[in-house]
Image (cartoon, helix red, strand yellow):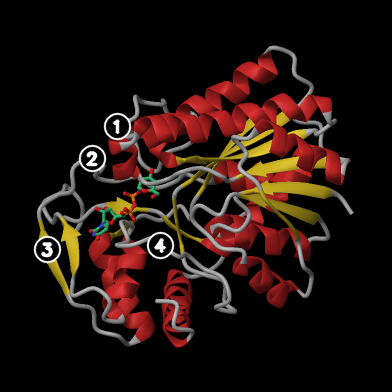
Amino acid sequence: MKKILVTGGSGYIGSHTVVELQNAGYEPIIIDKLSNSTEAVVDRIERISGKRPAFEKVDCCDLEATEAVFKKYGDIEAIIHFAAYKAVGESCSIPLDYYRNNLVSLINLLTLMPKYGVKGIVFSSSCTVYGQPEIVPVNEKSPIVPANCPYGNTKQICEEIIRDTIASGSPIKSILLRYFNPIGAHPSSLIGELPNGVPLNLVPYITQTAIGIRKELSVFGDDYNTRDGSCIRDYIDVVDLAKAHVLAIGRMLDKETEKVEVFNLGTGNGTTVLELVKGFEEATGVKLNYRIVGRRAGDVEQVYADCTKANEVLGWKAETPLSETLLNAWKWQLKLRDEGIM
Ligand code: UD1
């Protein structure tokens, strides 16, 4: 079985990807410093797949500790690098923490890879690199624009660090995956997103409002130039997204390809905030308390993916209907209440 090191593997997207790697016959090894997740996630992964993934509580910014993991497991074939800080607003207040954490961890992995014969790295990037694209849907050739926050900048710089390292002759390959808006939870309701404190992302805020943890959802703006005035995003099911990582690993390891490849991962459909709210109410039968307020600073008006390349080259397509994804997000919120977690 091919060993795949999954940094941030107990986090939201990481945990779903570990399950899909196991389903596909890989042996994932999780490394996570647990800054935004707990080791209980490893038990839950085991409950879903029947297989317990190896777990190491290690910070990838710690070069020695990370190297010890490479030594301990030997013959790691590839890495999926999720471990990163990801809150846009927070990154503006503590930029150095963001730059240190997100850049140093990647630099350490890239340093260790050739030494231990690790062949490739799949990197979690974001559609934030496109800013507000002139043309939507946005494809991979769309220009990268200056980031509007340190978080977004770390994604751009990490992409460049990978390209520069490979251009310098490092014997590795990479696939950069630019996620649109990942939402939902595993259909088993055993893993999902666990926001720290007040959620900043739309869907966790919706589910927490629906269950009564929050009083009402603020819809940030209805005066955008869109069909109903609210912002448009491309909401992609987290399990569909996880499956793309498995395909990326297979492609990177088993096919003759360019050394660096980029794929957009979304559904190809733009959904407005108000459509998402309505979709949630319809899918769950729960009425949502919401109010239109002013725009949120830094939001782009509309961005959704042209996924033609992922469809044709990676052989991946988002499959889960939005209503099912929203229902899974709701079932996960109910589960968190039932288990007294939130
Ligand atoms: C943001 C980042 C993205 C990052 C992602 C992860 C930008 C432009 N994008 O995505 O790079 O990867 O977070 O955290 O900064 N909304 C409400 N009410 C709420 C919350 C959100 O109306 O309480 C609206 C927002 O205005 C937006 C949409 O819902 O139109 C989605 O927001 P959110 O879930 O925060 O994701 P993005 O801002 O798209």
Residue 60 vs 241, above or below: the answer is above
Would you say the beta carbon of the disc 3 residue lies within 8 angstroms of ligand 1? no
Closer to the chain start, of discs 2 and 4, is 4
Tell me which corner region of the image, top left, top right, bottom left or bottom right, holds residue 116.
Answer: top right
Q: CA distance from mark 2 to mark 4?
A: 21 Å
Of badges 4 and 3, the one in the foreground is 4
Within 10 angstroms of label 2, few (less than 14), some, or many (20 or more) residues? few
Closer to the chain start, of discs 1 and 3, is 1
The kind of secondary structure element at disc 4 is loop
Instruction: Identify which amino acid the numbered label 2 is placed on.
Output: Gly
Disc 1 designates what residue? 148
The kind of secondary structure element at disc 3 is strand
Disc 3 designates what residue? 292
Disc 4 designates what residue? 195
Q: Residue at x 51, y 42 (%)?
A: 84
Q: Residue at x 61, y 62 (%)?
A: 16
Instruction: Identify which amino acid the numbered label 3 is placed on.
Output: Ile
Q: CA distance from mark 1 to mark 3?
A: 24 Å
Would you say the beta carbon of the disc 1 residue lies within 8 angstroms of ligand 1? yes
Would you say the beta carbon of the disc 2 residue lies within 8 angstroms of ligand 1? yes
Residue 140 shows up from this direction:
no
Q: CA distance from mark 1 to mark 2?
A: 7 Å
The numbered dot on residue 298 is 2
Instruction: Identify which amino acid the numbered label 1 is placed on.
Output: Asn
Image position, residue 19 (x, y; %)? 69, 64
* Observer-nearest of 296 and 52: 52
Image position, residue 249 (x, y; %)? 74, 45
Q: Residue at x 32, y 87 (%)?
A: 285
Of badges 1 and 3, the one in the foreground is 1
